[in-house]
Amino acid sequence: MKRKALLNTASAVGKLRAGQVIAYPTEAVYGLGCDPSNEAAVRKILTLKDRPESAGFVLIASDFSQLKPWVADIDKSLIDRAMQSWPGPVTWLFPRAPGVPDYIAGKHDTIAVRITAHEPSRALCEAFGSALTSSSANHRAAEPARSAEEVDAYFGDSIAGILEGALGESQKPSEIRDLVSGAIIRQG
């Protein structure tokens, strides 16, 4: 199989704006990403991963303004709680904004969001000007991809490309916390 070309940030943004799915490095593993407001692109990720819609997605961003359309209006003290760990590898479950589709939030009343500190992901969100979906680059029953070669082996020409850049140094997926209760849902 011919290796998928690596994309620079500008090329990756062009693919995202065209409604395509790309892979990109995150803090610990490669992720599959697309424009979360593009239902067809999101559904393509669900199909590629054999992932149920009910699971929902994590959205990553470079700043909180990119997350505002997706999260409900809440008390500033709760936002401050999340901001104490951001940017960084902590995903918070925020109350879901009215109108957020099930294909993004799944069956949940919350939506999983993170402001990433990982520079390639952060630069991608900043250049795109919006949050992106973030779901580990693997089929549901497989281990997450930790290299561009593994992404290629899993998805080949089914995705539009792979953002160049290195993985972060984390060996574990991001920690997940509930914003309202503060409870740790998944240890990071």
Image (cartoon, rainbow, N blue to C red):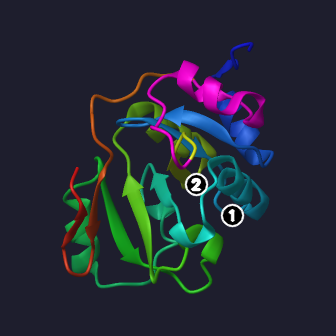
Pointer 1 residue: 37
Figure label count: 2
Reply above or below: 173 against 50. Answer: above
Q: Which residue is depicted at the point 52% across and 50% down?
A: 135
Front-lying residue, 153 or 122: 153
Q: Secondary structure at mark 1?
A: loop
* Place of residue 22 in the rendered image (x, y in percent of width and height, measured from the top left): 66, 38
Judged from the image, the secondary structure of the residue bearing numbered disc 2 is loop
Q: Is residue 31 left or right of residue 38?
A: left
Q: Residue at x 66, y 56 (%)?
A: 46
Q: Position of residue 132 (x, y in %)?
A: 56, 52
User: In the rendered image, which quarter is residue 20 located in?
Assistant: top right
Amino acid bearing label 2: Ser
Instruction: Point out residue 124 in the picture as x, y percentages from the top left corner.
Output: 55, 38
For marks 2 and 1, the one nearer the N-term is 1
Query: Is 84 in front, or is 24?
Result: 24
* Above or below for 178 versus 140: below
Residue 65 percent coordinates (x, y):
47, 63
Question: Label 1 amino acid?
Answer: Ser
Quadrant showing the N terminus: top right
The magenta-colored residue range is 140-163
28 displayed left or right of 105: left
Does residue 107 appear in this view? yes
Front residue of 82 and 168 = 168
Number of the label disc, if any, that sits on residue 130: 2
Q: Could you tell me which residue is drawn at 58 percent across and 54 percent down?
A: 130
Dividing the picture into quadrants, the one containing residue 53 is: bottom right
